[in-house]
Image (cartoon, grey):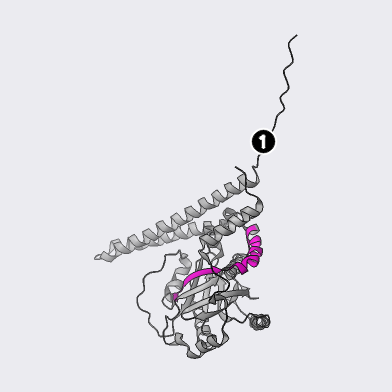
Amino acid sequence: LKMAGPSTQVKIAQKTWEMANNIMEVSAEEEIYKYDHQHQQSLLTAKPWEKDPHFFKDIKISALALLKMVMHARSGGNLEIMGLLLGKVEANVMIVMDCFALPVEGTETRVNAQAQANEYMAAYIESAKNVGRLENAIGWYHSHPGYGCWLSGIDVSTQMEHQMYEDPFVAIVIDPIRTISAGKVNIGAFRTYPKGYKPPDEEQSEYQTIPLNKIEDFGVHCKQYYTLEISYFKSNLDKSLLDSLWNHYWVNTLSTSTLLTNADYTTGQIFDLADKLETWDNTQGRVWLGAGQEGSDKKSDDKLSKATTDSCKITTEVLNGMLGQIIKDRIFNQVSCKQITAVEPEKPSA
């Protein structure tokens, strides 16, 4: 079998990434790429989202914006990063067309936007309008390196403030560490409920691993916001920009090992799981000393089931990392060529 060339491998990797994230291709002539200023102004005047706290249910993100967010989040490493989303609304769907990074100071647990970031934000949007990009700021994004996609107490307060003064506005969270481990973008889009609003009981969203030291913050605020359904789109006009960005993304992906890059994350996940099991074991021990705790067995089984899910996830990610290293080793370090050995003709016997 003939080995695919470098350009072919890049294209295959890009196509695989698009398929893993369910990116749909649409025509550049479709309404999603057109900006109707009058229609957008009429929506801003009517403000239908104020009558229904659950008005926006879906969000569509361009592949270009998705890749830019992922690359920005990865560049921050273990520090949180932050950026702004540009887009529009159509009916009850939020549409993100583009995004840009903000010059902010980040730590491992929070990101702080200073006056400089606000000035940069205003100047960028004004410059975008000067070149025909009429979309307004429709939300913000930031990263949660290694601890999942949800809103912390600070995030909830920030998003509530944005929705109070700049609605429609959405919050997007990306986990670059889990994205590297899973191969699929770990992302969430959220909107907060108004203060004092009590949401109806909703079906539990897809389970995600929350570190033990973050569980309290997650649990206290998880009923103050809801998740939007995310889909992605692209057109053939995005090709040159996507190809350019992908070349940088692909080179970074090839030149890194998930086993090495995420070594601290994987070790932390194992220690976190051990701490959870120890905490639950101590709790269960106290329950056994009591009486009439019929519901405790169900809670114990639920926690054990989550622990099993977490351990399987860690194992799968490590195995995928090892498989990736083996493939890279075979491709780049063990390319063998057929050696042609000249066979000397036999000498005639005397």
Number of disc labels: 1
Depth check, front residue: 105 or 228: 228
Q: Is residue 11 above or below residue 162?
A: above
Circle 1: residue type = Lys
Percent coordinates x, y for residue 99 in the rendering: 60, 74
Horizontal arrangement in the rendering, residue 1 relative to residue 276 (left or right):
right
Which of the 4 quarters of the picture holds residue 257? bottom right
Residue of label 1 = 338
Q: Is residue 243 magenta?
A: yes
x then y, percent, for residue 254: 63, 55
Instruction: Give the residue drawn at x 65%, y 84%.
Output: 122
- Using the rendered image of the protein, determine whether residue 51 is visible from the camera's viewpoint: yes
Q: Secondary structure at mark 1?
A: loop
Q: Residue furthest top?
A: 350
Which quarter of the figure is the N terminus placed in?
top right
Residue placed farthest to the left in the image? 292
Q: Residue at x 72, y 27 (%)?
A: 342
Say if 349 sits above or below 47 in the image: above
Q: Residue furthest bottom?
A: 45
Direction from residue 53 to residue 80 in the image, left or right:
right
Extent of the magenta region: 226-250
Dominant secondary-structure state across the stretch colored magenta:
helix
Q: Nearer the viewer, residue 223 or 327?
A: 327
Give residue 98's quadrant in the image.
bottom right
Image location of residue 247, percent across then percent down: 65, 60
Count neighbours of disc 1 (C-alpha within 10 A) and say few if under 14, some if 14 to 19, many if 20 or more: few
Magenta segment includes 225: no
Q: Residue at x 73, y 20 (%)?
A: 345
For the C terminus, the image quarter is: top right
The picture places residue 182, in percent across and down from the top left corner, at 52, 58
